[in-house]
Amino acid sequence: MIKLDDINRKILDLLQMDGSMTNAELAARIGLAPASTLERVKKLEKSGVIRKYVALLDSERLEMDVTVFVEVSVTDHSSESIREFVRTVEEMPEVLECFFVSGGRDFILKVVTKDIASYRQFTISKLGNLPHVGKIESIFVLSTEKSETALPVGRRD
């Protein structure tokens, strides 16, 4: 496990805000030499603290207007059945996130589609056809009031 000192935390905060920042820009912002900065970033990547770099897209501009949290109950709770469900939803591009949860449901999925008709088709032809899927409940997002991707690594409470 890599040590997250204050400099590493600052690197992580800055890269979460702008993953396209050059090493020279990052070094200038944290006050280290570019070679030292690059070495720290490479260690954070190698350790798995930094998993990957992505571009965050605007779903509205891409006309992906429907976001739904889908609660799914499965009828078979064997480890193989759970693994099969997860493997299958990992291949569904509409599913952005999949959580295995406690409580009244087994999974919560974050699903994004173009419109209600597309979501209906998704639930009928994809999700509803999976083996061992019991109950499916949909919670439609009316508006997004906060959406963050950055973990609060710089703050230490």
Image: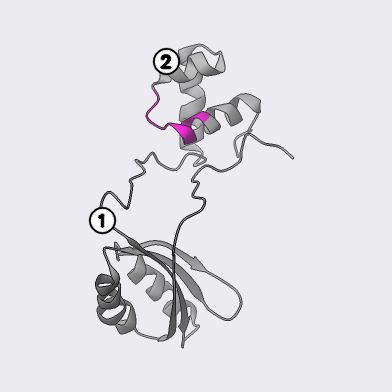
The question of residue 134 being in magenta is answered with no
Where is mark 1, residue-wise?
A: 63
- Mark 2 is surrounded, within 10 Å at the Cα level, by few (under 14), some (14 to 19) or many (20 or more) other residues, namely some
Region of the chain picked out in magenta, as a range: 14-21
Classify residue 42 as left or right of residue 2: left
Label 1: how many Cα within 10 Å (few below 14, some 14–19, many 20+): few
Q: Position of residue 140 (x, y in %)?
A: 42, 70
- Quote the CA–CA distance across marks 1 and 2: 36 Å
Residue sitting at x 47%, y 33%: 17
Mark 1 or 2: in front is: 1
Q: Nearer the viewer, residue 2 or 11?
A: 11
Give the mark nearest the N terminus, 1 or 2: 2
Residue drawn at x 27%, y 67% is 115
Residue 82 against residue 25 in the figure, above or below: below
Residue 116: name its quadrant. bottom left
**Could you say whether the residue bearing mark 1 is in a helix, strand or loop?**
loop
Residue that numbered label 2 is attached to = 24
Quadrant placement of the C terminus: top right
Query: Which quarter of the figure has residue 13?
Result: top right
Left or right: residue 129 versus residue 52 is: left
Estimate the x, y position of residue 8 in percent, counting from the top left.
Answer: 58, 28
